[in-house]
């Protein structure tokens, strides 16, 4: 005959169970009386997956990656597909760049805040390569991170603390995110990427660092006591210099493309662009297929454009369009046919019909025909949807021979947030004879969706433009991290 089993509960176990029940009851009472709003939000967020708008985007994806550790050469395993909660988390500063085969490079601090992490994200949203390449970094308000396409790979430039010391360094990686440069290369803080290397300001000169580690550097000298700046593209690179205390002219020098077989130091021909006689309020440089130029907005509201074409100075033009004292010049770009100048102005009356006292931002583009200098003033955004919003930054780039792509960010201030989250991303293209067609992506700002806190421009080629939006995701331990979402337009 089979004996019946019997469960015997010890007094200690019974006491433990009673105390556990009492503890849970106290937690429930505290959450009800004191309002554990943060806990309730977290539970609701985990139960209801966030949604992001996609209707106006060609691509919007979330990568996933299993990081099993970095290999000795700086590369990381490919083909890692795991839950998004374990994937691609960053901290600011962050950066992006376009890659071949419709991929995108993304970089930022890792969750620990001590390493620079780079990922290559495919068009399906999965991370196909990753690497932690620089250790011992520290995020500060002055820190900056930039990515530049480098052949099939990417060049990362870090400006900030490393090992508790200020550093400006470049690291070049191949398409698999393996190191091309065996160790970081020192560069200047003012830098821009060219077709085959990086130009950066080094005191009274600018220095060229090729992507290939075996290639030699080039240093272009400038007269002492000049303020130097750079403007670069896949077509050409230019150095702009202005003497200390000097106004009314800027010297422009085209930088050499070829790289020699030895380190060299040389001077290049410079031409002077004569600008307006009045004090400049805003100034922006641009590159065209046959040269470079400068647009200046002075304190009288006049716009002056000066160009170098095929090595010769084109007489400067004071444009017919005049703007108000509140207008700001925020961006300039050019192609073979026209120059586009983006202007912004706060206008309170645009919000008056809705009874809102906050100003709206009027965004306009001034299109200047490079053949006959005819001007067209185009309204890009003036509707009351921008009431109370912060606008910018602006991203402009030629796309093909006839169009210029434009995009910008709108932020909506939120009480309790130190930085306003992104409320919309707006983009479109402008041609010489075609209007700007606005495509607006409104981002949901509520408790059930992860806020967009940053957008990194990845640049354009002849077919597409790439940017990466970063959403803020709260972690269980109360910390937060950024998840990248690739935006192709």
Image (spheres, helix red, strand yellow):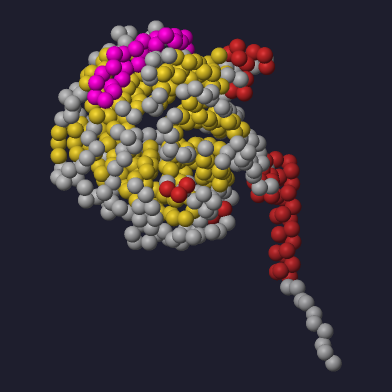
Which sits in the foreground, 299 or 358? 299
Q: Is residue 324 visible?
A: yes
- Stretch of the chain drawn in magenta: 302-326
Q: Residue furthest right?
A: 1
84 to the left or right of 246: right
Residue 98 x, y percent position in the rendering:
43, 43
Q: Quadrant of the N terminus?
A: bottom right
Up-down: is 92 above or below 344?
below
121 to the left or right of 386: left
99 to the left or right of 357: left
Task: Say which residue appears at 34% left-offset and 47% top-offset.
Answer: 151
Residue 197 x, y percent position in the rendering:
28, 42
117 to the left or right of 42: left
Residue 50 x, y percent position in the rendering:
64, 44
Asked if residue 396 lies in the magenta stretch, the reply is no
Task: Say which residue appears at 36% left-offset and 22% top-offset.
Answer: 284
Q: How would you classify the magenta stretch by its main secondary structure? A: strand
Task: Say which residue appears at 35% left-offset and 55% top-offset.
Answer: 178
Residue 384 x, y percent position in the rendering:
62, 20
Asked if residue 317 lies in the magenta stretch, the reply is yes
Task: Say which residue appears at 42% left-offset and 18% top-offset.
Answer: 368
Q: Quadrant of residue 190?
A: top left
Q: Is residue 472 visible?
A: no
């Amino acid at each position: 005959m089979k004996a019946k089993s019997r469960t015997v509960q010890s007094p200690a176990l019974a006491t433990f169970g009673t105390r556990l029940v009492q503890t849970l009851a106290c937690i429930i009472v505290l959450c009800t009386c004191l309002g554990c709003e943060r806990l309730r939000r977290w539970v609701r967020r985990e139960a209801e997956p966030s949604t992001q708008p996609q209707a106006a985007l060609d691509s919007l994806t979330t990568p996933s990656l299993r990081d099993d550790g970095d290999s000795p050469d700086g590369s990381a395993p490919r083909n890692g597909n795991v839950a998004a909660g374990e994937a691609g988390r960053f901290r600011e500063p962050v950066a992006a760049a376009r890659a071949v085969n419709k991929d995108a490079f993304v970089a930022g601090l890792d969750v620990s805040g001590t390493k620079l992490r780079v990922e290559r994200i495919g068009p399906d949203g999965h991370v196909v390569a990753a690497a932690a390449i620089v250790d011992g970094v520290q995020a500060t308000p002055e820190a900056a991170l930039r990515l530049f396409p480098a052949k099939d790979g990417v060049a990362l430039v870090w400006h900030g603390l490393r090992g508790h010391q200020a550093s400006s360094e470049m690291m070049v990686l191949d398409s698999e995110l393996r190191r091309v440069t065996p160790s970081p290369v020192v560069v200047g803080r003012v830098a821009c990427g060219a077709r085959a290397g990086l130009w950066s300001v080094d005191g009274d000169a600018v220095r060229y660092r090729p992507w290939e580690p075996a290639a030699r550097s080039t240093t272009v000298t400038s007269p002492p006591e000049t303020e130097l700046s750079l403007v670069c593209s896949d077509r050409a690179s230019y150095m702009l210099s202005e003497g200390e205390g000097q106004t009314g002219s800027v010297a422009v020098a085209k930088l050499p493309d070829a790289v020699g077989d030895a380190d060299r130091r040389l001077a290049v021909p410079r031409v002077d662009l004569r600008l307006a006689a009045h004090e400049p309020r805003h100034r922006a440089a641009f590159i065209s297929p046959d040269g470079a130029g400068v647009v200046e907005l002075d304190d009288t509201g006049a716009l002056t454009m000066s160009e170098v074409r095929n090595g010769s100075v084109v007489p400067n033009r004071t444009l017919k369009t005049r703007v108000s004292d509140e207008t700001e010049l925020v961006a300039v770009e050019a192609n073979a046919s026209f120059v586009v100048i983006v202007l912004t102005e706060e206008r309170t009356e645009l919000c008056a019909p809705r009874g809102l006292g906050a100003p709206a931002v009027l965004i306009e583009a001034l299109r200047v025909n490079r053949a006959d200098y005819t001007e067209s003033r185009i309204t890009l955004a003036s509707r009351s949807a921008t009431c109370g919003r912060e606008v910018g930054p602006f991203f402009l780039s030629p796309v093909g021979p006839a169009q210029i792509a434009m995009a910008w960010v709108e932020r909506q201030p939120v009480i309790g947030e130190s930085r306003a989250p992104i409320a919309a991303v707006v983009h479109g293209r402008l041609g010489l004879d075609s209007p700007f067609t606005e495509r607006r992506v409104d981002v949901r700002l509520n408790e059930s969706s992860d806020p967009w806190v940053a957008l990194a421009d990845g640049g354009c080629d002849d077919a597409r433009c790439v940017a990466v939006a970063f959403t803020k995701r709260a972690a269980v331990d109360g910390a937060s991290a950024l998840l990248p979402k690739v935006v192709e337009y």
